[in-house]
Image (tube, rainbow, N blue to C red):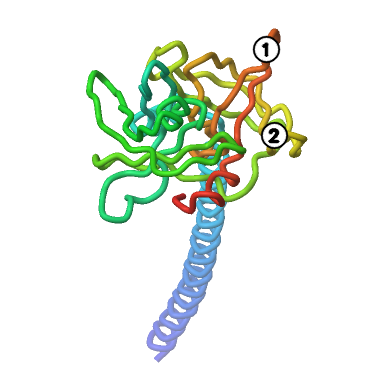
């Protein structure tokens, strides 16, 4: 009898010990699960933070001025213009023209001799190829002319808002007939209309005869102006017709 009671006591003791151990193990498992959950939450928060930082860096990289990228995107849409004895620059703009073909902008003074003589045909040149184009419409006061080519070329996009002083720009053209010339600078000022001249974008990127009619491009690869003149006897003073003036007058952007 005593032996049986002793055995029962031992079994009860073993059961109590096992219960205590099971409870301890259960507590440890609960703590481990909480620690794992907390670790996963921290990892998730770190991942979210890294994702936000990566997104911010991507946006920042997108706003960095990259003349090489701008030039690569713009050059296929820019042409040297031959109008009689004169040469200049023109660029495709907007969507394809009605009925097919491509609309382009250049300066009126580039095609003035042909226009005044009653002619309407000029030539576009690029990478050793020549494409015929027609003078469709001119704005003598603002020194802008619209051309139309039968070929299909990618049109550049006009900036939706006016450029601001200090913004970096790229100017593409054919100074002295040298095709695919790229220069960079900043917008120096926006000039209001004066007697005998319309509004103008002043910039400091180098330009020369032959740049006339070429696009002035912002960091987002949008046209902000049409290069038109360089101040005589001065360096770092170039002028462009604001693209908004041309777009409003010709409705082809």
Q: Nearer the viewer, mark 1 or mark 2?
A: 2
**Circle 2 SS class:** loop
**Residue 54 in the image, given as x and y percentages of width and height:** 51, 44
Kindly identify the residue that appears in the image at 22 percent across and 23 percent down: 129
Marker disc for residue 45: none
Q: In this view, does 52 lie above or below 148?
A: below
Q: Is residue 209 above or below residue 226?
A: above
Q: Distance between the residues labelled 1 and 2?
A: 16 Å
Lateral position of residue 226 relative to residue 239, left or right = left
- Which residue, as the protein is rendered here, is positioned at the far bottom? 1
**Residue 167 in the image, given as x and y percentages of width and height:** 66, 33
Kindly identify the residue that appears in the image at 57 percent across and 26 percent down: 228
Q: Residues within 10 Å of mark 2 (few under 14, many from 20)?
A: few
- Which residue, as the protein is rendered here, is positioned at the far front? 117
The mark tally for this picture is 2
Lateral position of residue 187 relative to residue 134, left or right = right
Front-most of 74 and 56? 74
**Residue 191 in the image, given as x and y percentages of width and height:** 74, 34
Kindly identify the residue that appears in the image at 49 percent across and 20 percent down: 211
Lateral position of residue 191 relative to residue 154, left or right = right
**Residue 235 in the image, given as x and y percentages of width and height:** 68, 11
Which quadrant holds residue 229?
Answer: top right
Residue at image mark 1: 232
Front-most of 55 and 139? 139
Residue at image mark 2: 197
Q: Residues within 10 Å of mark 1 (few under 14, many from 20)?
A: few
Kindly identify the residue that appears in the image at 67 percent across and 29 percent down: 187
Which quadrant holds residue 1?
Answer: bottom left
């Amino acid at each position: 009898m005593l032996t049986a009671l002793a055995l029962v006591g031992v079994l009860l003791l073993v059961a109590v010990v096992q219960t205590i151990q099971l409870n301890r193990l259960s507590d440890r498992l609960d703590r481990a699960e909480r620690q794992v959950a907390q670790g996963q939450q921290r990892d998730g928060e770190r991942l979210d933070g890294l994702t936000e930082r990566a997104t911010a860096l991507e946006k920042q990289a997108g706003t960095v001025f990259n003349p090489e990228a701008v030039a690569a995107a713009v050059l296929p849409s820019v042409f040297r213009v031959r109008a009689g004895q004169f040469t200049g620059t023109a660029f495709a703009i907007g969507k394809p023209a009605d009925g097919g073909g491509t609309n382009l902008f250049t300066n009126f003074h580039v095609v003035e001799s042909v226009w005044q003589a009653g002619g309407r045909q000029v030539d576009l040149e690029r990478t050793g190829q020549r494409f015929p184009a027609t003078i469709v419409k001119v704005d003598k006061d603002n020194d802008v002319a619209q051309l139309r080519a039968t070929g299909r070329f990618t049109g550049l996009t006009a900036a939706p808002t006016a450029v601001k002083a200090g913004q970096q720009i790229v100017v593409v053209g054919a100074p002295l007939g040298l095709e695919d010339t790229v220069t960079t600078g900043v917008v120096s000022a926006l000039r209001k209309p004066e007697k005998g001249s319309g509004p103008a974008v002043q910039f400091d990127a180098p330009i020369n005869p032959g740049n006339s009619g070429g696009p002035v491009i912002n960091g987002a690869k949008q046209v902000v102006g049409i290069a038109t003149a360089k101040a005589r006897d001065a360096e770092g003073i170039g002028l462009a017709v604001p693209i908004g003036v041309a777009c409003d007058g010709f409705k082809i952007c």
